[in-house]
């Protein structure tokens, strides 16, 4: 074989040139890759980093236009670009996805088109119309692998095709771009979560809180739709959302779990996490992307962190709700309390509407008797039943409140005339009048109802409550289960009553209270055997105030205890003074006791201490208790202790209540007072005459003394004597007298004292 040195040298030169070209290409590719990767490593936001990368890609690959696009159906939305004018329509209307773009997305690999020997020719469908003036000759479509169906597209007018060595560089850059974008977006979301998570805690009501959560979740996950579900009794209820359509909202409530288990991403692109609580999920958060796009990795972690923030905020909202309930709700019935009532009433009175506002003030009749007889727990049970009946008596928009004790208030919005208020009041009375079963016992209570009508913009809550209270007292004075609507007279009585209640607090200190004494005589000889001490209040403005008015006030306010002890001490001191007189020896003093006094701690000891401190013996004192409501099992020890000490016990108003004879057997009663309502009928009234005869027979058979009250005529006195009644008191025998006038009655040889002018016809 012939050897030609020239041929070998040419081969070596050619190989050397090829090696030099390869080294130059490798250096060029390495340099390009370093430039591109350095952009990805610089600190910047995802948007800024993407724009810088596209600029460098345009530079190193000599591209006229470099874009990053996201597939939206069969079109491509431009998300960033280098080389496109700012007013290019691609930013608003997107591009159609050409064959090359669809192929790159479907295959998940870079596709090039151009004039190269190995390239597929670039078609007009692959070049957007707005780029036609650039005469694009080659292009590359690079999938950003795993990043929301995105592509990097490089367009260039140069006829030089993309080389095979360009593809690995583009693939590497796209892969690193995907990782960097995910990390930057995750960091941005975490930062946004740190900055905006506290916005949840500003909401103290659940509905605004969940609405805020849906809005924040949309930003944190870049989702198209978000919603929040709350699970109640195995059903998922939609509480807030962003982006849901009307037909989608109609799908709630539905059984819990149909959206997939919390913490997973469904095939349809719905990601869900649970808002945790020990006893089960507090709520469920959902984020969804249209067209089934997958969420970037880490989204579930971000949603979990957000769910923990939301859980804390929901717990705070529940605590706030509980505290608000405690501040505005009655703890027994769950109804609005007095504070919430006033707030609501003020709000409805300030509404600019043509209608008016009605108010009903309901006070139970007979509740105290049930409470005393069966105990406080039974009383609470009765109040719960009353509250339930009242709920059924009113409209859904009306407010029902427990004002205090056994008082309830109803606010009627949208009322036009007073007759409507009276109608609702009558319905309330009817609904409350049926029997109740409390503590295994059948009891009956009714309600006295006062109603008023308020004018928006003129009436105040205070005035309405005051006038309704006044109307209620008018109703109560007419009997049980009555309704009275507001009038001017009731308003004036209300103001007077409020004034008197306030003034009563100071009546004792201001020396406005005093005692008068009505003697108790023997009906045959008119000898005085005792005096009954009667309390009177002379007000500097209102004048003489009836005991029937101020005694209940004193009992309601609790002042009756102090006043009652003052009355007993003053009466004992007066009796002690009369015992110093020869003609006063041996007479007794009768003092009335309030039921409130009977239930005070150490009541018997306090009573005996007052009697003995005056220098009297307990045997000198008669204590009167009424039959109506005071004789309960819980006062047995009290009256027994007094009886053992020598105090004479008087049962007042006998025959007007249940006349339970077991009281007479169980308690050390010595004296019965025949009520004046029977005494007034002994002349010409066969029924009353028979009742008095029966009472006298009972007293005689039990060895008790009977006293007839309210004797006002000679005929009544004569009839009582014929029946065998020995003792009596009343207007005929003597009016209640001041101490000096009463003392003169003890002197039998002196003429009778002039009539006492403190009251025209005082009660016995």
Image: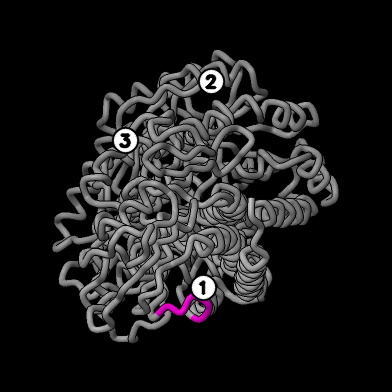
Q: How many labels does the image show?
A: 3
Residue matched to label 2: 699
The x and y percentages for residue 602 are 78, 39
Residue depicted at 65% across the width and 28% down the height: 634
User: Residues in magenta?
Assistant: 59-63
Q: Is residue 646 above or below residue 504?
A: above
Q: Earlier in the sequence, mark 2 or mark 1?
A: 1
Residue matched to label 1: 50
Q: Is residue 617 above or below residue 144?
A: above
Contact flag, marks 3 and 1 (Cβ < 8 Å): no
Residue depicted at 38% across the width and 78% down the height: 65
Residue 432's mark?
3
Q: Which of marks 3 and 1 is nearer the N terminus?
A: 1
Return the residue nearer the eye: 173 or 424.
173
Mark 2 and mark 1: span between their CA atoms?
110 Å
Of helix, strand and loop, which one carries label 2?
helix
Return the residue nearer the eye: 133 or 737.
133
Query: Which tag is nearer the camera, tag 2 or tag 3?
Result: 3
Return the residue nearer the eye: 374 or 518.
374
Q: Main secondary structure of the magenta part?
A: loop
Of helix, strand and loop, which one carries label 1?
helix
Q: Which colour scheme is used?
A: one colour
């Amino acid at each position: 074989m012939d050897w030609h040195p020239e041929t070998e040298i040419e081969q070596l030169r050619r190989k050397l040139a090829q090696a030099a070209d390869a080294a130059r290409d490798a250096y060029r590719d390495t340099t390009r890759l370093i430039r591109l990767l350095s952009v990805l490593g610089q600190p910047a936001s995802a948007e800024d980093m993407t724009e810088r990368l596209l600029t460098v890609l345009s530079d190193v690959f000599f591209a006229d236009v470099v874009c990053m696009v996201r597939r939206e159906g069969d079109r491509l939305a431009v998300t960033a670009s280098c080389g496109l004018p700012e007013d290019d329509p691609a930013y608003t209307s997107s591009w159609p996805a050409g064959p090359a773009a669809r192929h790159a997305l479907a295959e998940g690999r870079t596709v090039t088109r151009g004039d190269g020997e190995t390239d597929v020719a670039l078609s007009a469908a692959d070049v957007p119309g707005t780029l036609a003036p650039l005469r694009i000759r080659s292009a590359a479509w690079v999938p950003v692998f795993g990043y929301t169906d995105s592509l990097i597209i490089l367009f260039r007018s140069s006829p030089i095709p993309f080389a095979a060595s360009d593809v690995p560089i583009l693939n590497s850059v796209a892969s690193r771009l995907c990782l960097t974008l995910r990390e930057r977006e995750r960091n941005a979301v975490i930062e946004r979560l740190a900055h905006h998570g506290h916005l949840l805690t500003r909401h103290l009501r659940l509905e605004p809180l969940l609405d805020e959560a849906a809005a924040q979740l949309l930003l944190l996950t870049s989702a198209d739709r978000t919603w929040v579900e709350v699970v109640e009794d195995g059903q998922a209820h939609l509480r807030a959302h962003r982006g849901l359509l009307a037909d989608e909202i109609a799908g709630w409530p539905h059984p819990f779990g149909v959206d997939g288990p919390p913490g997973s991403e469904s095939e349809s692109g719905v990601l869900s996490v649970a808002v945790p609580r020990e006893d089960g999920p507090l709520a469920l958060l959902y984020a969804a992307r249209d067209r089934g796009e997958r969420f970037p990795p880490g989204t579930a972690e971000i949603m979990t962190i957000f769910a923990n923030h939301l859980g804390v905020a929901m717990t705070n909202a529940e605590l706030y709700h509980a505290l608000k309930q405690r501040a505005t709700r009655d703890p027994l019935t769950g109804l609005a309390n007095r504070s919430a009532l006033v707030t609501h009433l003020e709000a409805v009175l300030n509404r600019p509407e043509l209608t008016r506002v009605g108010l009903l003030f309901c006070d139970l009749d007979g509740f105290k008797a049930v409470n005393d007889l069966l105990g406080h727990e039974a009383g609470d049970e009765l109040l719960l039943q009353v509250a339930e009946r009242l709920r059924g008596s009113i409209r859904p928009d009306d407010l029902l409140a427990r004002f205090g004790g056994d008082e309830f208030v109803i606010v009627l919005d949208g009322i036009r005339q007073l007759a409507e208020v009276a109608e609702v009041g009558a319905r309330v009375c009817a609904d409350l009048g049926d029997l109740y079963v409390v503590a295994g016992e059948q009891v009956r209570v009714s309600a006295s109802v006062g109603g008023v009508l308020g004018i928006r913009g003129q009436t105040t809550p205070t005035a309405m409550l005051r006038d309704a209270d006044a109307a209620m007292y008018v109703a109560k004075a007419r009997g049980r289960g009555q309704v009275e609507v507001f009038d001017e007279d009731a308003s004036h009585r209300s103001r007077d009553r409020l004034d008197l209640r306030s003034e009563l607090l100071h009546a004792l200190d201001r020396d406005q209270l005093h005692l008068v004494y009505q003697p108790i005589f023997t009906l045959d000889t008119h000898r005085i055997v005792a005096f009954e001490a009667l309390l009177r209040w002379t007000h500097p403005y209102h004048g003489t105030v009836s005991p029937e008015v101020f005694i209940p006030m004193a009992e309601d306010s609790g002042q009756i205890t102090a006043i009652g002890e003052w009355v007993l001490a003053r009466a004992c001191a007066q009796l002690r003074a009369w015992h110093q007189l020869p003609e006063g020896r041996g007479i007794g003093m009768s003092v009335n006791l309030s039921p409130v006094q009977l239930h005070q701690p150490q009541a018997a000891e306090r009573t005996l201490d007052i009697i003995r401190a005056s220098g009297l013996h307990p045997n000198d004192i008669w204590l009167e208790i009424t039959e109506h409501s005071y004789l309960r099992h819980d006062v047995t020890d009290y009256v027994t202790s007094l009886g053992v000490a020598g105090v004479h016990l008087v049962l007042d108003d006998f025959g007007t209540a249940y006349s339970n004879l077991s009281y007479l057997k169980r308690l050390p009663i010595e004296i019965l007072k025949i009520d004046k309502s029977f005494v007034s009928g002994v002349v010409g009234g066969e029924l009353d005459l028979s009742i008095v005869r029966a009472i006298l027979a009972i007293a005689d058979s039990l060895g008790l003394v009977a006293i007839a009250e309210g004797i006002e005529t000679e005929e009544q006195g004569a009839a009582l004597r014929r029946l065998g009644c020995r003792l009596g008191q009343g207007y005929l025998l003597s009016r209640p007298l001041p101490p000096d006038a009463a003392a003169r009655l003890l002197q039998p040889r002196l003429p009778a004292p002039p009539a006492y002018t403190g009251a025209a016809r005082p009660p016995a």
